[in-house]
């Protein structure tokens, strides 16, 4: 569990760079989706390296920058790049940026990711709203001594992905003319892609997509009282469902192809969030 003084130091560093009220919405952009941050107007940029508690990502397609500004008329804080456990970050470290954002007043967190399709109907380019997740990593950012000032020892995950937020996403997709599926995301630790046998197991468990992120952030956000929504961009069929070898380069390329629809979806969603 992150120490409160570490959270406060990170919050102080961000407050010094961002005058006035901090946004109540935060967005984390996954692999290949960083271009959405370029649409943010009147931005203030802070490198993760300048924020105590923000480890710097090392994966291609993740810039490592916090950008605060306005998109679709809505103020938000955008993490342009995320941290992954497979980079060597402990799960508890992945939670620190989430807790810092909460300390700054963020009330809702939107998580995006690039994912593999376990459901054979979810081919490359499919957008999927996350209804629930399966944590197959064996890790949890809440392991360790609990800070009751941050959240409860045993947080309820019955509605980890807020039903109200999911409803707003579905309505925005209709207005934007963007097809949006709904399904279950399974979190695997990585960095190796999954084996065909693992994918068959995940399908048996009811998963629709698989990826290497999102769940630690969701757990940390629910623990500290945020409303969470999650969006997966399917970039490939998972191992064993196609004859194509899986590469991170293809993940980035397919996410870029879906970008226009992701942008339309967010431009329709953000004005409905209020504040």
Image (tube, grey):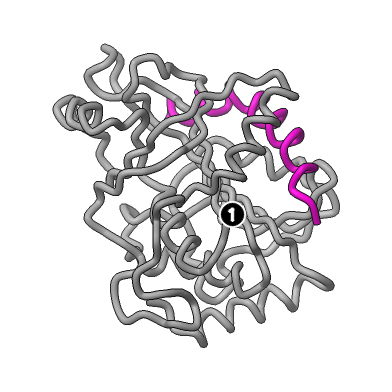
257 within the magenta span: yes
Q: Is residue 242 above or below residue 38?
A: above
- Please tell me in which quadrant of the rendered image residue 200 appears: top left
Instruction: Residue at the far top: name it.
Output: 243
Q: In this view, does 230 lie above or below 48?
A: above
Which residue is located at x 42 percent, y 31 percent?
A: 183
Magenta span: chief secondary structure: helix
**Image quadrant occupied by the N terminus:** bottom left
Determine which residue is flagged by label 1.
109
Mark 1, other Cα within 10 Å: few <14 / some 14–19 / many ≥20: many
On screen, residue 194 versus residue 123, left or right, reads left
Q: Residue furthest left?
A: 197
Q: Is residue 83 left or right of residue 172?
A: left
Nearer-the-camera pick, 63 or 171: 171
Horizontal relation, residue 203 to residue 9: left or right: left
Q: What stretch is highlighted in magenta?
A: 249-275
Quarter of the figure that contains the C terminus? bottom right
């Amino acid at each position: 569990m992150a120490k409160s003084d570490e959270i406060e130091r990170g919050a102080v560093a961000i407050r010094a760079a961002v005058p006035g009220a901090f946004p109540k919405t935060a967005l984390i952009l996954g692999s290949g989706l960083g271009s959405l941050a370029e649409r943010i107007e009147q931005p203030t940029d802070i490198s993760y390296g300048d924020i105590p508690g923000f480890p710097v990502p090392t994966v291609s397609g993740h810039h490592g920058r916090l950008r605060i500004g306005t998109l679709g008329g809505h103020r938000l804080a955008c993490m342009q790049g995320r941290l992954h456990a497979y980079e060597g970050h402990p799960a508890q470290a992945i939670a620190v940026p989430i807790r810092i954002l909460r300390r700054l007043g963020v009330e809702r967190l939107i998580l995006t990711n690039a994912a593999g399709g376990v459901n054979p109907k979810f081919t490359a380019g499919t957008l999927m709203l996350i209804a629930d997740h399966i944590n197959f990593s064996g890790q949890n950012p809440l392991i360790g001594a609990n800070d009751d000032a941050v959240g409860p020892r045993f947080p309820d995950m019955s509605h980890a992905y807020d039903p109200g937020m999911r409803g707003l996403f579905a309505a925005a997709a209709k207005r934007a003319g963007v097809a949006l599926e709904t399904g279950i995301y399974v979190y695997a630790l990585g960095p190796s892609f999954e084996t065909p046998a693992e994918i068959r197991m995940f399908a048996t468990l009811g998963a629709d997509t698989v990826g290497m992120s999102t769940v630690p952030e969701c757990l940390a956000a629910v623990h500290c009282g945020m409303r969470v929504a999650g969006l997966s961009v399917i970039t490939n069929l998972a191992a064993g469902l196609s004859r194509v070898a899986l590469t991170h380069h293809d993940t980035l390329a397919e996410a870029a192809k879906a970008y226009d629809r992701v942008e339309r979806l967010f431009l329709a969603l953000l004005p409905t969030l209020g504040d």
